[in-house]
Amino acid sequence: MAITVLFRLLSCRSAACVTLGARRSYSKLQVSSVLSERLRVFESLRERQGKRRRTEATEKSLSIRLADGRTVKGTAGVTTPLFICQSSRVTGVLVSKVNGELWELGCPLEDDCELQLLGFDTLEGKQAAWRTGACVLGSVLEGVFGAEVCREGASEFGLYCDHLLENSALSLSDVEERCKEAAALKLPLSRLELNTEEVQELFQNSKLRLQLVEEQMTDPTVTVYRCGDSLAVCNGPLLPHTSLLKVFKMLQVSPVTLANQPEASGVMRLLGVAFPGTKDKEEWEREQEEARRRDHRRIGKDQELFFFNDVSPGSCFFLPKGAHIYNTLTDFIKSEYQRRGFTEVVTPTLYSTALWERSGHWEHYSANMFTVTSEGSQTYALKPMNCPAHCLMFEQRVRSWRELPLRWADFGALHRNELSGALGGLTRVRRFCQDDAHIFCTPEQLEEEIVACLDFVRSVYEVFGFSFHCLLSTRPTPCLGEPEQWDSAEQQLEKSLQQFGERWELNPADGAFYGPKIDIQIKDAIGRQHQCATIQLDFQLPIRFDLQYVGPDGQAHRPVMIHRAVLGSLERMIAILAENFGGKWPLWLSPAQVMVIPLGGNSESYAKQVVQQFREAGFMADLNEDQGATLNKKIRSAQLAQYNYIFVVGEKECVSGTVNVRSRGGKQLGRRPTEEVLTSLIQLRDTRSNQDEF
């Protein structure tokens, strides 16, 4: 026990020395009175919480199971994942998972557990590095450049810092160098969990910072970190100290549009990335170059699929080829509906606010709705989701248990008032369509319905060639409903996942406030993760709408409601597919399936017959009638336009009723009877094959 106490005292003194030394050698500006007071409050709160933890601390032996199957011993409240890394000589670790929950390396373990050690090559490790980099950047902006930092964090694209800086322009290279210098000081990162009152006390002298913190508080507490002389608000684990980051790269500075502030706020966002080493940066740069090559916005322009216009910001104009992809995806899902017992419904787009007040969306989501005022000052809103309308349909008459499950699908247009700064191509839009469906079932049918939804997801994603895994997102804080109800629902979802048989993991406290959910993450051709499909349980809407069905006992019972989407937003899925295939669409989905090239003479008439024949069979077939281009140029042009197949027809093909086929990749498949080729391509299309040869 005495050794443990001594170890803790030495650790605290060491961290304090590093912090003091860093302050002396690094700070370029004198710490302002506002920051000094903020640091004083932070340290006072930390001392208060530290006393409480020391009083509550209990030491006991732990059994810690590692990912390689080994088991190591530890002491509760003392042993940390960082200590295990050091004693096992494991390098490159940035963050850990304890029983599936993200855990800081420097945070002591509390109970027997399974421990995963994660590096920069994992999404969790990369995010922890970038969150830490955001704290370093915030410290530099405040301590060196005199900026007022009001928000920092990490996204899938990197780290960012929102700040106010008067009468000064930042040099990105200068900021990079300063961040590198600051990180090298091995600044410790100490954390506090603060409630609303404590946050208000801490940021009382920064109205904007306090406003943004309170907006992002979805739980009773928020995590605040100290990095040098700066404080940062972050929603996830950080690295144990800053020197694990060796390389910084700043990408851009741009203005930020704040919620509920239509006028320019003067807040600027500095976006960047940070890496443990040069090799990590070089790998990221290769990934970025490949991502630029596959960017769906470039593909959409080059292939004339879609465009955007300021007359309707955030709403996509799909050109004929883009509409072909859109409709093909919709038809794919509709064909699955017929096999899986779903029926389509059509619902209005505009609703009185009375509906949204009844569903609870007006209270929580009205800022994201487009509203219209009609005669009599009645306010209406464009629907951002379909679920309240489906509840109205369910309550139109008395329902019997014999009707359940009811599976209703809706392809209605949805509108969400996204901030203009958040819009980006097809991935974030204001007008979109989902393959949305809601299932009303009895509690006894729930497990079977969940397994059926998961099978639906698997069958669709196999067609695209996506690998995927599932996340079971459990009860958040706060949430609606009784704990027993949540426990039962989570157990049923877990049983369904076990029966499903695919890889899944726990995602603690990330469920919707109205029920637990299963999120499905796919991995595309270049290894990026996307969350598209979701299966959510909802306890609250059936209560709010007082939905009932008559059971076998003749009594009224409450149905269970499942929200389900497989593709998610069609617009976003088209973006993901464009980038996954790099614009080389498989035949069944392609907007440019066949190009016919005549060699002149009588072959032109025959070429037109071939085009007509394939169009009548439902193919996107075109004819190259350019008299001034050579054959090689025509073939190359068709390949660049990503036509799946190129048919060259001359006198021989005209006489024999054949076409000379070559694939998009340049492979010559030879002269074949036109009817045979048509039959083969119909087979490839109708089976949704991703193969090129036949």
Image (tube, grey):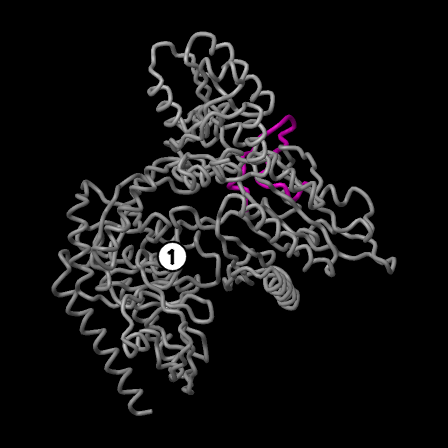
Q: Is residue 447 left or right of residue 657?
A: right
Above or below, comparing residue 289 to residue 444 in the picture: above
Q: Is residue 53 left or right of residue 593?
A: left
Residue that extends furthest to the bottom in the rendered view of this protein:
2
Over which residues does the magenta segment extend?
365-389
**Picture quadrant of residue 236:** bottom left
The foreground one among 208 and 431 is: 431
- Residue 439 x/y as whole percent: 69, 49
- Residue 187 x/y as whole percent: 22, 66
Q: Does the magenta stretch include residue 75?
A: no
Q: In this view, does 459 lie to the left or right of 400?
A: left
**Can I make out residue 382 in this image?**
no
Residue at x 31%, y 87% (from the top left corner): 4
Amino acid beneath label 1: Leu
Q: Which residue, given by chain and number where applicable, does mark 1 sit on?
A: 123
Above or below, comparing residue 608 to residue 561 in the picture: above
**Picture quadrant of residue 127:** bottom left
**Can I make out residue 205 in this image?**
yes
The foreground one among 384 and 44 is: 384
Residue that extends furthest to the right in the rendered view of this protein:
554
The foreground one among 12 and 117 is: 117
In the rendered image, which quarter contains the N terminus?
bottom left
